[in-house]
Amino acid sequence: MTDQATSPFVRQTLVEPRKAPIKTIGIVGFIRQRLLNSPLNIFLTVASLALLALVIPPTVKFLLVDAVWHGNDRSACLEANAGHVVGACWPFVQAKFDQFVYGFYPGAERWRVNLTFLLGALLLVPLLIPRIPAKTLNSGLFFLAYPIIAFFLLRGGGIRGFVVNWSADLGSGLASSFRDAGSQLTGAGEAMTGGLGWPVILLGRAVALFGQALGWVILPLEWMRDYTQRFAATVWIDLTLTAAIISLLAFFLTGGFRNGWRALLRSVAVFAGIAVVIKVMDLDHGGLPVVDTRQWGGLLVTLVVSVTGIVASMPVGIALALGRRSTIPLIKVFSIAFIEFWRGVPLITVLFFATYMLPLFLPGNFTVDGLVRVLIGIALFAGAYNAEVIRGGLLAIPRGQAEAASALGLSYWKTTGLIVMPQALRHVIPGLVNSFIALFKDTTLVLIVAIFDLLGQLRASFADPNWATPTTLFTGFAFTGIIYFVFCFGMSRYSLFVERRLNVHKNV
C-alpha cells in the first residue's frame, strides 16, 4: 500500500470551461489597449473622432465633391454658371501650373529645369536605397558633380578659365582690397588729432603690408593666368595645368611611388570627367543661353534654396559643433560666437543683410548674384542650428569610446570620423530632420527680398483678374499646402526608416 502523501493526484471530474480571454491582437486588441483602456483615453478618442468629423468631410467636399475640374477662365468657377455650390477651382491651378513650377523661366528653356530635376532624382533615389552598391561614387556625383552641372544647366553661360584663372582673379582682388583698406586706414589715422591716430596708422600699415605680401604670393598664379590667356583654348590649357598641379599634389601627399598611384589615377579620372562635361555642355564656347536668377521662381526656387541650404548646412554644423568642443581657445570662442550670433538673429534679418547690406562690404569690382547671397545666408543660419543639434549627439557618446580609440593608436580625425561622429549623427536623426523640415518651410521668407518661390508665385498669381473668384485663394493655398506636406511628410517617413535601420540593436 502506497503512502497517500507521496502518491500522484488524479482528478476524477472535468474542469469547468472558462470564458474566452479578451482579444489582445488585431483591430479589436488595438482599440482595447490603445484607445479605450482608461477613462481619459476614452474621452480623448471621442474628442478626436468628433474633431475629424468636423474637419475631414468639409475638406473632402471642398477639394473633390464640389470642385470644378474643367474651365478656361473664372466663369467656370462661379456658382451662377456651375449650378451648385462651388468648391476648389482646379482650372486655376491648371492654368498657372507652369508658373508655379518654373516662375518666369523662359518657356523655350524649361527643358533645362526638367533635365535638372531628372538628374537630381536619378542620383538621389539610389543614394536613399541602402542595398544599392557604389555609394561612394553616387555620393561624389550627387554632392560634387551635380551642383556644378545644375548651375550651368539652370543659369547657362560658359567659363573663360579654370582654377588657375579663378584663384588668380580672387587673390588679386583680395590683395588690392587689403591694400586699399590699409591706405584708407592710414589716411584716417593721419587725419586724427592728438595721440589717437598712431594705432590706426599702425593697423593700416599692417593691413597694407598683408595685402602686399598676398600679392607676392599669388604672383605665380597671375603669371600662369596671363600665359594661358594668350591662347584661344584658354579653358583647356588652364584645365590641363590645374589637373597636373592637383594630381601631382595628390600623388606626393598620399605616399608618392609607394601608395599614391590610386590617388593619382582617381584625380586623373575626375579631371577627365570634367573635360567631358565641358565639351558636352560647350562651356568653352559660351555654353547655354544665360537665364538670370531674377527669372527663376516657383517650385524651382523652393527646391534650390532648400536643398542647397540642407546640404551646405551639414558640414558647417559639423565644423561648428567640433569647434565648440575644441580645446584650442581661439577656435572654441569663434565657434561659440558664430553659433550664438546666428541663432540670435531672425532669418528675415539674415536675408535682408545678405541682399541689401552685403554688397556694401564687397569691393567695387566684385559682385555676387542675389540668389547666391541668399543661399549663403541660409546655409550659415541653418548651420548654426545644426551645430547645436550635432553637439547634443556628441555629448551623448561616452568618453570611453574616444579613449578606446586613442588606446588603439587612432588619431583625432580618425576617431571623430570613424567612431564618434557616426554614433552622434545616429542619435540626432530626429533633431536634424526637424531642422531640415523647418528650413524647407522657411524658404517662403525669400519672398521678402523679391525672390518668388512657390508661395510667392502663388501670391503673384492672385493678381490675375481672369481668375478672381471667391474660391481661388483657398484653392491656391490648398494646392501649395499639399506640395509642402508631401515633401515634409516624405522627409519625416524616410528619417524614421533610417532611424530604425541604424538602431536595430535597440529594437531586438
Image (tube, rainbow, N blue to C red):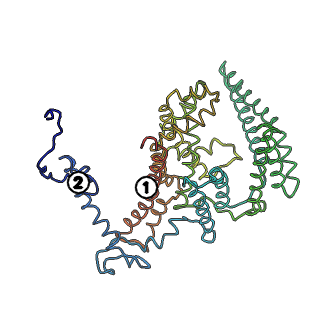
Q: Could you tell me which quadrant the N terminus lies in?
A: top left
The answer to whether residue 70 is seen in the rendering is yes
User: What is the distance, in whole Å, between disc 1 and disc 2 at their CAs?
Assistant: 33 Å
Of the two numbered discs 1 and 2 in the rendering, the one whose residue sits closer to the viewer = 2
Q: Residue at x 50, y 41 (%)?
A: 426
Work out whether residue 198 or residue 374 is closer to the camera in this orientation and state it.
Answer: 374
Q: Earlier in the sequence, mark 1 or mark 2?
A: 2
Residue on which the image places disc 1: 489
Q: Residue at x 73, y 63 (%)?
A: 281
The percent coordinates of residue 248 (x first, y second) are: 82, 42
The percent coordinates of residue 380 (x first, y second) are: 56, 42
Looking at the rendered structure, the kind of residue marked 1 is Phe
Work out whether residue 390 or residue 312 is closer to the camera in this orientation and state it.
Answer: 390
| Rendered image quadrant of residue 231 | bottom right
Q: Decide: is 56 above or below 344.
A: below
Q: Which residue ends up furthest to the top in the rendered image?
A: 195
How many other residues sit within 10 Å of disc 2, few (<14), some (14-19) or many (≥20)? few
Q: Could you tell me which quadrant the C terminus lies in?
A: top left
In the image, is 262 to the left or to the right of 32?
right
Q: Secondary structure at mark 2?
A: loop
Q: Residue at x 51, y 53 (%)?
A: 446
Residue 23 marker: 2
How many other residues sit within 10 Å of disc 1, few (<14), some (14-19) or many (≥20)? few
Looking at the rendered structure, the kind of residue marked 2 is Lys
Marks 1/2 in contact by CB < 8 Å: the verdict is no
Q: Decide: is 224 above or below 61.
A: above
Residue 15 marker: none
Q: Which residue ends up furthest to the front in the rendered image?
A: 1
In the image, is 131 to the left or to the right of 280?
left
The percent coordinates of residue 373 (x first, y second) are: 60, 48
